[in-house]
Image: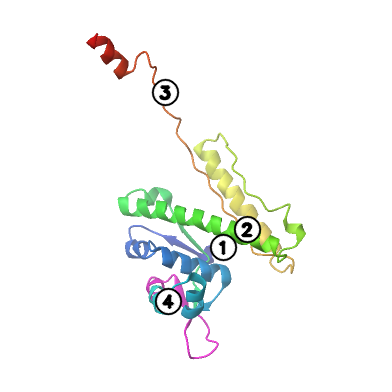
Amino acid sequence: MAGEEHKRVLDPEHDAAALKALTHPLRIRLLGLLRQDGPATASELAARTGETSSSTSYHLRVLAKYAFVAEAEHRDKRERRWRAVHSVTSWNNTAMDAAPESRAFVGFARRRQIEHLEASLARHEADIAAGRLGQEWLEPANISDSLLRLTPESLAELRLVLDRNAAELTARDADDPRAAQVVFLVAGLPLAPRDPAPDPDTSPSASADEDAS
C-alpha cells in the first residue's frame, strides 16, 4: 500500500475544483494508466484508450493543473511525458458526505473502481491464457464476497489491519524479482436490514377492498 508521501488526500472544502476535474471518466482512466504502467506520452495514452492524442493531451493538462500528474523526464524533446504524482487518491467519507457534490463524487469514484476491477479481471484471464503469468499465480489469485456481521468499529479495524499487512508485505517483496503487480481491491459496504414484506391481510389494498364490499 502507498505510504503517506505517495497519497493525495482530498478535502471537499478546499479541493472542490480538483474533485470536479476527476469526475471525467477519461481523466480517471488516464490517471489510472499512469499509476499502473508508469510515465507515458499523450500519444501513447491515446493508443491505449482509443482516444485522439489531442484529447488525451487536453485532459492530461487538466490533471496537471490540479497536481494529479506532472511532467516526467523526457526521452526526447519531441513530446511531453507525464507521470502520476501520487499512487493513491484518498478522502474522509464523513467529510465527503457533507455536500451533494462531494457525495456524488464518492459514488462516481467507487463505480470507476468496479470498472477497473472488471478490466483487471479480463487482463488477468488473458495473461493466464497466454502464458504471461506462471502457474504459481493461479492459486493465490481470487475474488471473494464474504458477508460479515460487524460493528462500525470492527469494520474500521479490519480496514486498518488490511492496510497495515499490505504495506508490510509490499515492503518485504519490493526487491524480489518474482513479485508482480497485483490489483487488490477491498470493499466494506454495510447494508441496512430490508423492510419486512407487508402482510397481505393487512395491506392497504386488502383493507380498501374490504371497505368497498
Q: Considering only vertical position in the picture, is 83 above or below 149? A: below
Query: What residue is disc 4 on?
Result: 52
**Marks 2 & 3, CB-CB < 8 Å contact:** no
Disc 1 or disc 4, which is closer to the eye?
A: 4
Q: Which residues are magenta?
A: 60-81
The residue type indicated by label 2 comes to Ala
Task: Mark 4 or mark 3: name the one nearer the start of the chain.
Answer: 4
Query: What residue is disc 2 on?
Result: 167
The stretch drawn in magenta includes residue 42: no
Work out whether residue 17 or residue 115 is closer to the camera in this orientation and state it: 115
Question: What distance separates the C-alpha of mark 4 from that of mark 2?
Answer: 37 Å
The residue type indicated by label 1 comes to Gly
The residue type indicated by label 3 comes to Ala
Disc 2 or disc 3, which is closer to the eye?
A: 3
Query: What residue is disc 1 on?
Result: 3
Task: Kindly state the secondary structure of the residue where label 2 is placed.
Answer: helix
Task: Kindly state the secondary structure of the residue where label 1 is placed.
Answer: loop
Task: Kindly state the secondary structure of the residue where label 4 is placed.
Answer: loop
